Image (cartoon, helix red, strand yellow):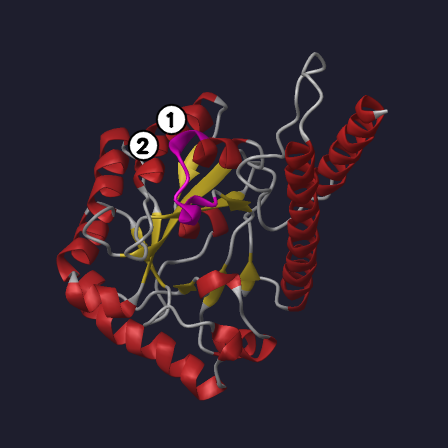
Amino acid sequence: MQRKTYYRTLLLLISLMIAGSSVPTAKSAPASAVPLPAASSIVPSPSERESSVQAAAEYAASARKRRAAATSWVTLERMYPGVFVTHGPRGKRRAALTFDDVPDPRYTGKVLDVLARYRVQGTFFVLGSLATRHPALVKRMQREGHVVGNHSYSHALFSQLTQEQFRRQIERTDAVLAPLVGYSPRFIRPPYGEVRPAQLQWAKRNGYIVVNWDVDSADWRSLRSRSVMLNIRRTIQPGSIILQHAGGGPTQDLSGTVEALPRIIRLLQSKGYELVTIPELLGAAPDRK
């Protein structure tokens, strides 16, 4: 009887995993799927069964959240074509590497070193508050051919800001970046990917493009390199915009991102992908003129 109960649980886990992975979403699935034992495994203990069921429930809940977020982003893309984007044209085998929460003296330079070694250009979404503290890293991005975008001044959650607060976050960061890179960035990456329609209307009026992503490495969870790579590998497609981080909070460990990056570049190039910047992917200039 105990064994039958276990296999019923196993079938439930499998069905939840299939349901969670069969719907395309704006963000990738969790870094590690619910672990399933081999057919020859012994019957698990009650505590192990309870843990597996809980993990399955958490997986299903996260899948529902991802589907809701994806639907919202699809709606925004339809409402604001060319102003809110999560990917480029699907007809060409191209992809863009993007890096958020920079500059960070712990990791940004290491990411730049890898990109230089492989002669790949990326797009870096810069926080104005960090750029004021580490201007040399921002200048290096520009000098080595990368594109700089606006990631707000203080990593503010745009959906919780008034229109005036939102405007100040963007314009204050622009004022910091323009002298460092020689242009006012056209591309905005909302922290957490959240943005409101009124903010997109403002962006359109002022010549900005808001760029989210369709491939989430989930590296902000301090994942190991293998998990970072798997998250990208299983969701990449032509035109993808890949979200990674080259900076973060004091408790975040992005060594997995740095370690995975050479393997990611080699993997994508072996599959025929051309790695390009966001302006190249979208066919738009990096600056507002």
Discs 2, 1 touching: Cβ within 8 Å:
yes
The residue type indicated by label 1 comes to: Arg
Q: Quadrant of residue 168?
A: bottom left
Q: What element carries label 1?
A: helix
Image coordinates for residue 253, horizontal then vertical, percent: 32, 45
| Residue pointed to by mark 2 | 259
In the shown orientation, is residue 57 left or right of residue 124?
right
Viewer-proximal residue among 184 and 45: 45
Residue 76: image tag: none
Residue farthest toward the left in the current orientation of the protein? 136
Q: In which quarter of the image is the C terminus?
A: bottom left
In the shown orientation, is residue 139 left or right of residue 67?
left
Query: What residue is at 34 percent from the left and 78 percent from the top?
Result: 171
Query: What residue is at 18 percent from the left and 54 percent from the top?
Result: 137
Q: Is residue 190 magenta?
A: no
| Residue pointed to by mark 1 | 263
Q: What element carries label 2?
A: helix
| Region rendered in magenta | 218-226
Separation of marks 2 and 1 at Cα, in angstroms: 8 Å
Viewer-proximal residue among 259 and 55: 55
Q: Quadrant of residue 59?
A: top right
Q: Quadrant of the N terminus?
A: top right
Q: In which quarter of the image is residue 129?
A: bottom left
Image coordinates for residue 94, horizontal then vertical, percent: 49, 37
Question: In this picture, is 90 found above or below 199?
Answer: above
Q: Can residue 143 be seen in this view?
A: yes
Query: What residue is at 64 percent from the left and 65 percent from the top?
Result: 76
Q: How crowded is the residue under tag 1: few (<14 C-alpha within 10 Å), some, or many (20+)?
A: some
Residue farthest toward the top in the current orientation of the protein? 40
Image coordinates for residue 47, horizontal then vertical, percent: 64, 36
Query: What residue is at 52 percent from the left and 31 percent from the top?
Result: 233
The residue type indicated by label 2 comes to: Glu
